[in-house]
Image (tube, rainbow, N blue to C red):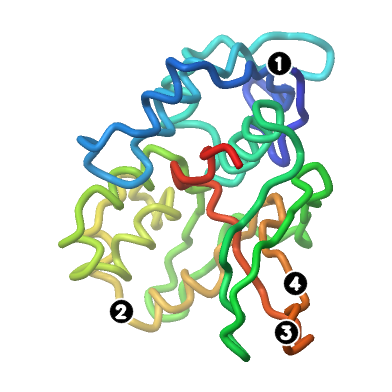
Amino acid sequence: MKFTLPNGLTGSGILFNQVYLEELTGKQQNYLINTKYKSPIDHIEPLLTDLIKRVESEDGQELDVPIKELINKHLSIEDTSFILAKLREITFGETYILEKQECPHCQEKQDLSIDLGSLEIMTPEKKENTTILPKSGLEVEYNPITFGKLKGYSSDPDQMLNNAVTSTLSMVVKRIGDNSNITEESIMELKALDNNHIQKNVPQQSHLDTKITHECKGCKVDFDIELEVLSSDFFVAG
């Protein structure tokens, strides 16, 4: 099936935003129960390498990039999340059940039925892709977070715990001044005021709205649930 990505990617001035997907088979279900992965999102790469058949422009020009490279280096994590939601939908249908969700107000547990086909694409107001740091005066250029960057970050629990700020910022910064070889050390060298500025001005990507507002069956007060589309549990049929 064909879907239009929230963002897509541009090459040689052409926007490639049409993705062709095939549904899960038993082969991919095996990926979802592999317990030897280093991070909780390692299942995504083999899953999408198998099931993304191609990416095209709207006029049918095919993107000439290997699917594995596309997933790790080019697709934004927002587009990847969209693809996973659509993959779940075409495999098991539009209805997705979240079982035994606890209301934060009255603690009553209830099953929630979600129509995946009704989830909306949120398109933020255009935000500049560069910003000037207030302390150093250097220009920062941003890039989207890709699956490959997120996987590398999530596979190292110590890094997540000890370097949360610098690791996160190094994923979204493409260039600082003339330096395009951005590492955690590049971020660590910046003053805290500059780092805060980088974080505050990260441009948002278009994304699938995975925040579900539900009225509790017990106390009748609304509460929010976030769909964890990057989790392997998202593909458990039910």
Instruction: Report, in whole angstroms, how far the alpha carbon at label 2 lies from the one at label 4.
Output: 42 Å
Q: Which mark is residue 214?
A: 4
Q: How many marks?
A: 4
Q: Which amino acid, by three-letter code, is at mark 3?
A: Gly
For marks 1 and 4 on the same chain, the one whose residue lies earlier in the sequence: 1
- Residue for point 62% across, 90% down: 105
Instruction: Report, in whole angstroms, how far the alpha carbon at label 4 lies from the one at label 3.
Output: 12 Å
For marks 3 and 1 on the same chain, the one whose residue lies earlier in the sequence: 1
- 2 vs 3, front mark: 3
Instruction: Report, in whole angstroms, how far the alpha carbon at label 3 lies from the one at label 1.
Output: 47 Å
- 2 vs 1, front mark: 1
Determine whether label 2 and label 1 are within 8 Å by CB: no
Q: Camera-side residue: 13 or 77?
A: 77
Which residue does the numbered mark 3 point to in the structure image? 218
Which residue does the numbered mark 1 point to in the structure image? 56
Picture coordinates of residue 204 (x, y %)? 64, 59
- Residue for point 60% across, 12% down: 53
Picture coordinates of residue 116 (x, y %)? 75, 45
Q: Which mark is residue 191?
A: 2
Q: Camera-side residue: 2 or 123?
A: 2
Determine whether label 3 and label 1 are within 8 Å by CB: no
Picture coordinates of residue 174 (x, y %)? 43, 48
Instruction: Report, in whole angstroms, how far the alpha carbon at label 2 lies from the one at label 1.
Output: 42 Å
**Secondary structure of the residue carrying numbered label 2:** loop
Q: Which amino acid, by three-letter code, is at mark 2?
A: Lys
Q: Which amino acid, by three-letter code, is at mark 4?
A: His
Determine whether label 2 and label 4 are within 8 Å by CB: no
**Secondary structure of the residue carrying numbered label 1:** strand
- 1 vs 4, front mark: 4
- 3 vs 1, front mark: 3
